[in-house]
Amino acid sequence: MDLSVKKVKSMEQEEMVKKLEQFASRNRIPFYSCFNKQRKLPNLARRYIAARYVIYDLNQIQEGLYFLFYDSSTGGAHGRSGWGDTFCGLYSEIEGFNANVIIKERLWLDGLSFKKRHFSGKHDIDKRLSILSDSKLSKHDFLSVKKLRHFMDMKTSMPALRVETEVEAWNIIPELDQKTLLSIRVSHWLIDSSKIKWFIENACKYLLDESFKFPK
């Protein structure tokens, strides 16, 4: 990549990070970010040195809940987590579950996947979503018909959404590294405040037992 292009990209990233920091400050959310010397993650693992990130600590909603904005800025990838990607999403540890799962929009290519497709048993869900895993799935709340229909409702407003679980996942957030994680994420950074609020509120409804609403 041309040095001038890299410089422009870096400036754009820094501006996006500043907007995300401002959102956190306005809403009194503790956060870490890559461009803020006072708020950087301590003892960052070497594999994340080049990463661009903003992390919202949402422990005031539920312990162990984080909203992560991540860009590897290297073009590399680290396993199934997609750490060579750019994305943002809500992350938490999941207990009593031991399978790697992807829930996403159903595509005809899913029939060519080596991962086994699982079915909810409801035609409207199985027509629109693919639930893919390389393991036998045990019952869990995030796989319930109620939660899957809520996920489909979210996808009408944000089609690129996907849900993932990952066993012993790499994660830039120290509290979540090497844990089994449940996430709901989208393959770009949300910058607009209203979209961030919408995402967190609706993703909390999916991940948690109780809903959350930002104060007006």
Image (cartoon, grey):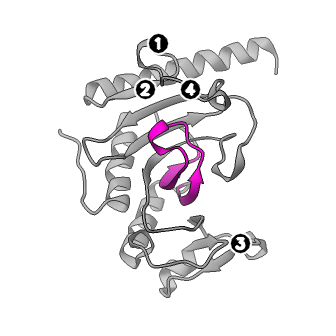
Image coordinates of residue 190 in percent, x first then y, are: 47, 38
Are the residues flagged by discs 1 and 2 in contact, CB closer than 8 Å?
A: no
Tell me the CA gap for discs 4 and 3: 33 Å
First in sequence: mark 1 or mark 4?
1
Quarter of the image for residue 171 reads top right
Q: Residues within 10 Å of mark 2 (few under 14, many from 20)?
A: many
Tell me the CA gap for discs 3 and 2: 35 Å
Check disc 1 and report the residue beneath it. 37
For the point 55% across and 59% down, which residue is it? Answer: 164
Q: Secondary structure at mark 2?
A: strand
Image coordinates of residue 87 in percent, x first then y, are: 57, 42
Check disc 4 and report the residue beneath it. 44
Tell me the CA gap for discs 3 and 1: 42 Å
Quarter of the image for residue 197 reads top left
In the image, residue 65 above or below residue 44: below
Check disc 2 and report the residue beneath it. 32
For the point 75% across and 11% down, which residue is it? Answer: 4
For the point 51% across and 86% down, which residue is it? Answer: 123
Q: Does 15 sit left or right of 58 as displayed?
A: right
Q: Nearer the viewer, residue 7 or 102?
A: 102
Q: Quadrant of the N terminus?
A: top right
Circle 3: residue type: Lys
Residue 115: image tag: 3
First in sequence: mark 3 or mark 1?
1
Image coordinates of residue 182 in percent, x first then y, are: 48, 57
For the point 43% across and 68% down, which residue is it? Answer: 96
**Residue range corresponding to the magenta coloring:** 161-187
